Amino acid sequence: MRTAGSLSLDHCLRDRVRHRGGDPLVTYYAPSSGVRIELSARTFANWVDKTANLIVDDLDVTEGDVAVLPLVTDHPGHWSSLVWIAALWQVGVLVRDPRQADGAPDLVVTGPEEYDDDFAGARALAARATVACALHPLGLGFPRPVAPGVVDYGAEVLSQPDVYVQAPASPGAPLWQAAGSSLDWAAVRGDAERLLADPSVGDVTYGRRLVRPGEAYATVLAALVAPLLGDGSVVVVDGPVDEAALAGIAAAERITA
């Protein structure tokens, strides 16, 4: 398990890039559409840095601000959702459960569900900035312009700088809020370490593990935090899939658990 690199999620990610940057970190499957996307640690970190630069420079969202992510609630296992979580935590932005009514957030990040009605629900949350993600397999934007006041993530993120040079988030910054409770990195790391200590996982390495997305926070722990702490990688299989197809994916990807 990583120790020196566990001061923050970003430290864990940079540590992985330095040691095994070319190895897979997240492999994403959507069997219903035939999508398979594999991101090495280096590629994932590049997406995180570009997204963090978009957050700070274009959206004017900084440490201490609050983000609501219907994207992650609706698509917790999508690689774009994991990138957004890592980028927001790198900046020090609190991710709040969309179902928790606690004033207007500073940022809303949504998926493509409301594309045809110009993201009325996302805009109704009255955030200072609203971003929509098309969830294109390669991270591209929507096929036509989105509503005024809504940022098309895929259309804007690729032009962002490849390196995030801002100061790291403060230790102890709140990162996740649900049911009235806020978690900082120490609490998130503790939850992931308990997952790693599960006898079915092993307490040394996370290995190459299959993740079936479920509740948002549990999925973030299993598909992002624990693999980085445990020096492993994940294969996320999203959406309906029969047992035979799932077994085939596990064999092809050399899943260890």
Image (spheres, rainbow, N blue to C red):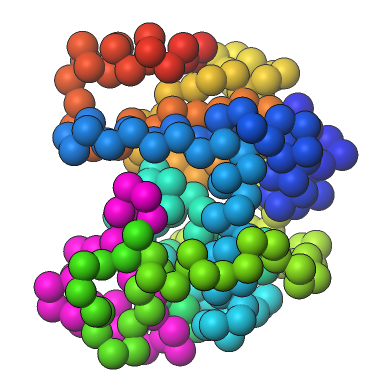
Position of 56 relative to 35 (above/below): below
Q: Is residue 154 visible?
A: yes
Q: Residue 94 versus residue 79: which sits nearer the camera?
A: 79
Q: Quadrant of residue 173?
A: bottom right
Q: Residue at x 64, y 61 (%)?
A: 162
Q: Is residue 125 magenta?
A: yes
Residue at the extreme front: 159
Q: Residue at x 39, y 37 (%)?
A: 37
Residue at the extreme right: 4
Q: Is residue 32 magenta?
A: no
Position of 125 relative to 228 (above/below): below
- Residue 18 lies, in percent from the top left, at 78, 38
Position of 46 relative to 255 (above/below): below
Q: Residue at x 32, y 65 (%)?
A: 141
From the viewer's perspective, tell me whether residue 21 is left or right of residue 86.
Answer: right
Count the marks: 0
From the viewer's perspective, tell me whether residue 72 is left or right of residue 158.
Answer: left
From the viewer's perspective, tell me whether residue 131 is left or right of residue 117.
Answer: right
Q: Is residue 96 visible?
A: no
- Residue 62 lies, in percent from the top left, at 64, 79
Region in magenta: 112-139
Position of 74 relative to 39 (above/below): below
Q: Quadrant of residue 245?
A: top left
- Residue 119 lies, in percent from the top left, at 23, 77
Q: Quadrant of the N terminus?
A: top right
- Residue 41 lies, in percent from the top left, at 62, 39
Q: Residue at x 60, y 53 (%)?
A: 46
